[in-house]
Image (cartoon, grey):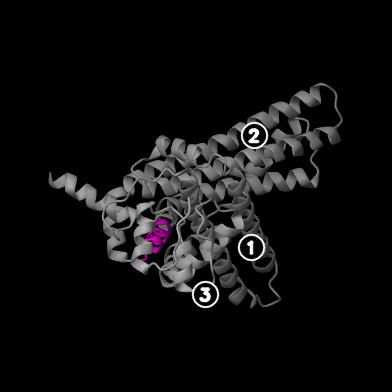
Amino acid sequence: MEISSEGCSPRTRSDHLRKEGSGEAPCQFLAMELSDHGHTNQIQSMNAWKILKETVWILRYNCWAFMAILALLICPVSTVLLSNILVDMSIVKSLTVRLMLVAKTSGLPLIPLIKQSCQHFAETVVSSAMCLPLYFTLLLLSKAAVVYSVDCTYSRKKFDALKFYMIITKFWRRIISTYMWVCTVVAGCITMFCVFLVCFCSALSVLGFSPDIVVGAAVLVGLVFSVIFANAIIICDIAMVISVLEDVSGAQAMLRSNILIKGQTQVGLVIYLGSTIGMALVEALFEHQVKMLSYGDGSSRMWEGPLLVIMYSFVVLIDSMMSAVFYFSCRSFRSAVDASTGEGNSILETMAISAETESVQ
């Protein structure tokens, strides 16, 4: 399906976009209006690179809104997460020792790789548990704000904090419900992996395989799990976007997400891989430059720490934006958008107006 923009006024092109749904060829018209760079007008799915370019255009269009989200909602969470100020290291050490005992009894040799993996896993689990209140408040609110801002951009509107507050109060329970399902899915995947890994390594050890073979098999299982886990994360991310933009939540949002990304999983995997590598690099830099190195007087922490926190927050912001753009791309690809009511309104605004009408009736 092709839509030509030649000879059309901005409003006509906006009408075309609204008739095809908010997700159809999202910012391809918008990019042509805002810059001299051209985008193809063909309605088709976007690869990861095109989604990144689309994300950059959206960031430029609503720059101040996204910077406010970054500073007020994402940076505080990133600061706590990177610094581990809420983490009790005694709990981490105790959990690390227990994990190493489990690894040893399952036949894995306590080589540095196994020890570091146990320690990193223990730190991640304890940090996630301690930061859970922040995840359910600031981080979740930031995700909803990012999705709202992307939706506003597709409607050629600027971010309105008051309108966002009024909208989010109507749908907050739905978003919380979906996020609880996301946490359950992530925890279930990790638990199943740990149980399977222990049983698999124990079986190999009982069968008489050497420790080196057991370690190699464990690494192979870890790689397979990484792909499965990445798919689960992609479904969860899109489910969060769906819970904000559509009238579904919880398990229904997860099912809707799984159906929506069929045929586009590879694109989602590339997006997830890029975001994960970016976050891991910044975490490693923070661990090495801020926590380990002090340069005698520790002055480097005064500027390197905040800089790395901002870098990490920016990667989180871009990841959330790309998830929202990926959602719109999948909707466009599958042609699953209904005709929108309320010309010029974003999806969220249209839903809020409908909810108010139903309450009055």
| Structural crowding at the residue carrying mark 1, measured as other residues with C-alpha within 10 Å and reported as few (<14), some (14–19) or many (≥20) | some
Q: Is residue 235 above or below residue 80?
A: above
Pointer 2 residue: 194
* Amino acid type, residue under disc 1 in the picture: Val
Query: As rendered, which of 191 and 228 lies closer to the eye?
Result: 228
Q: Is residue 152 magenta?
A: yes
For marks 1 and 2, give the CA distance. 26 Å
Q: Residue at image x 36%, y 62%?
A: 14
Does residue 358 appear to the left or right of 62 in the view shown? left
Disc 3 or disc 2, which is closer to the eye?
Answer: 3
Q: Which residue is denoted by mark 3 in the rendering?
A: 36
Locate residue 127 relative to residue 203 in the image: left or right.
left
The residue shown at (75%, 26%) is 202
The residue located at (35%, 56%) in the rendering is 18
Q: Position of residue 87 (x, y in %)?
A: 55, 53
The residue carrying mark 1 is: 282
Point out the stretch of residues depicted in magenta: 145-156
Q: Residues within 10 Å of mark 2 (few under 14, many from 20)?
A: few
Name the spot of residue 307 as percent of width and height, x first. 58, 72
